[in-house]
Image: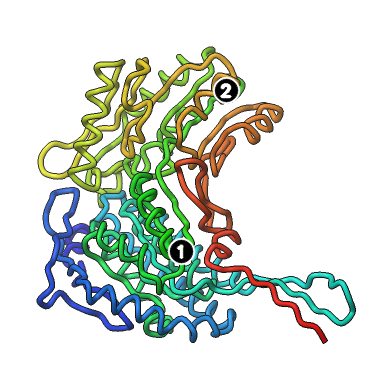
Amino acid sequence: MTSRAAAVSAYPTLRLLIGGEWIAAGERGTVPVVDPSDEAVLGRLPVAREDDLDRAIQAAADAFPGWRDTPALARGRILRGAAERLRGRRAAVAALIALELGKPLAQAEAEVEVACEMFEWAAEEGRRLYGRDIPARSRSLRMVAFAEPVGPVGAVAGWNAPAVTPARKISGALGAGCTLVLKASEATPATALAIAEILIEAGLPPGILNLVFGDPPAIGRRLATDPRLRLLSFTGGTAVGKELMALCAGTMKRMVMELGGHAPVLVMADTDVEAVAASAVTAKFRNAGQVCIAPTRFLVETSAYDRFAGAFQAATETIVVGDPFDAGTQMGPLQNARRRTAIRALVEDARAHGTVTEGAAPAGPGFWQAPAVLTGLAPAARARHEEPFGPVALIEPVADLEAAITEANRLSFGLAAYAFTGSLHTAERLSRAVQSGTLAINHWAASFPETPFGGLKDSGFGAEGGTEGLLAFTQQRFVSVAA
């Protein structure tokens, strides 16, 4: 039996998790979960009813006092136990990611490892949510400020990082002492369910984590408006994020929003241009470009443009697109038909406004799309303004550093940015001038479990990850006591 056949055979029965109870479809409606490599139905996912959502929220509310009062050391033991178990099942969970998302198996295994590190980080950092003594104005007064868990949390995760995004939200909320109702993606549910199962095995009490699926707009509205939930953590598109923020205002709900991006890459002529181009292709087409922080707009100093564009295009044409279970595959399919339609429309628009260089992709069933490089685009080209969220790279010449900075900051997005230079002076100028929540200079790693991750402008609100990510799930209080 091939690794793909074994993964399909082992694909689990899909369920909801509410108040510690696994709930099968029963008389509920279901939606199909589709393998993007061949469009075969992997399983059917139960759709949460209104009463299911109500029970999930109530379960989180009921479980909150006990979890809040559980010592951080004990919470951390459960999170560390989950990390150990998840790492032990890395191959099996990676196979689920490859099946549901189409991500090449090696990339999927790397994602699972990052998810493990997120649980480990939250387990340790939860013990360091310190308060502080404030110097009092008299000897008879004691003044203390401290952080406490904000309360039950609602969360929405997208499909493009089915292990990392749920792990980031779950570990941050649980590590801070909050309970959670998570709507993971209906397109990639088995990965989130596997993480939930592992947490329960690690000793997580009932009701602390509740996992639901169904109609995304309806569930999003419910999580944003229900007063029992005190924070909404959302990962998704900017337009939807803004709608949810407006709904959260009705209950004065706190928010953490990780929204869209269109990441610029500023390539200066004083760097090793060919080496940057080679590494850029790997970074750009990871997960078929379906990454919110994927490098997309390559702004190359004019004197280095021809060398960079030539090397990038040549490397793109050699990318092996194929079955994510094949060892030689570098890029799998897009996750769904909607994404393929959107990418093809952007590429066709680019043909009318510039030059398109494409690699190769399989024919037949599956949501296949060849990697594409766009050059010489006119200002009206859609790809210059819209986030592609797929295997599309734009390469543009810029006159100098200041022109690169101006173009990098032109759009309303500000999630991630990258830059390559051999000058410390230039690096310092970039660190102050580029408007993005994350800036990686001379490398491609824009996020780590121990660092804050969030966007500026239309790319988000608040932060996930790092100390800041745990603090996002808390509220500050001040207490003064007079003797």
Determine the CA span between mark 2 and mark 1.
43 Å
Q: At x 28% / y 59%, what residue is drawn?
A: 185
Picture coordinates of residue 22, whole percent (x, y): 25, 80
The reply to whether residue 436 is in sight is yes
Q: Name the residue tied to disc 1.
A: 253
Picture coordinates of residue 384, whole percent (x, y): 37, 25
Locate residue 153: give its quadrant: bottom left
Q: Residue furthest front?
A: 250
Q: At x 24% / y 43%, what residue is drawn?
A: 333
Quadrant where the N terminus lies?
Answer: bottom left
Give neighbour class at mark 2: few <14, some 14-19, many 20+ (Cα, 10 Å).
Answer: many
Q: 8 and 407: which one is in front? A: 407
Q: At x 89% / y 79%, what residue is drawn?
A: 139
Q: 449 and 253: which one is in front? A: 253
Relative to 479, residue 433 above or below: above
Q: Name the residue tied to disc 2.
A: 268
Residue 47 in the figure: left or right of residue 461: left
In the rendered picture of this protein, how many numbered marks are placed on residues?
A: 2
The reply to whether residue 88 is in sight is no
Amino acid type indicated by mark 2? Met
Circle 2/circle 1 CB separation < 8 Å: no
Query: Closer to the N terminus: mark 2 or mark 1?
Result: 1
Q: 239 and 195: which one is in front? A: 239
Locate residue 239: give its quadrant: top left
Picture coordinates of residue 306, whole percent (x, y): 45, 14
Q: 216 and 283: which one is in front? A: 216
Q: Secondary structure at mark 1?
A: loop
Amino acid type indicated by mark 1? Lys
Relative to 217, residue 337 above or below: above
Quadrant where the C terminus lies?
Answer: bottom right
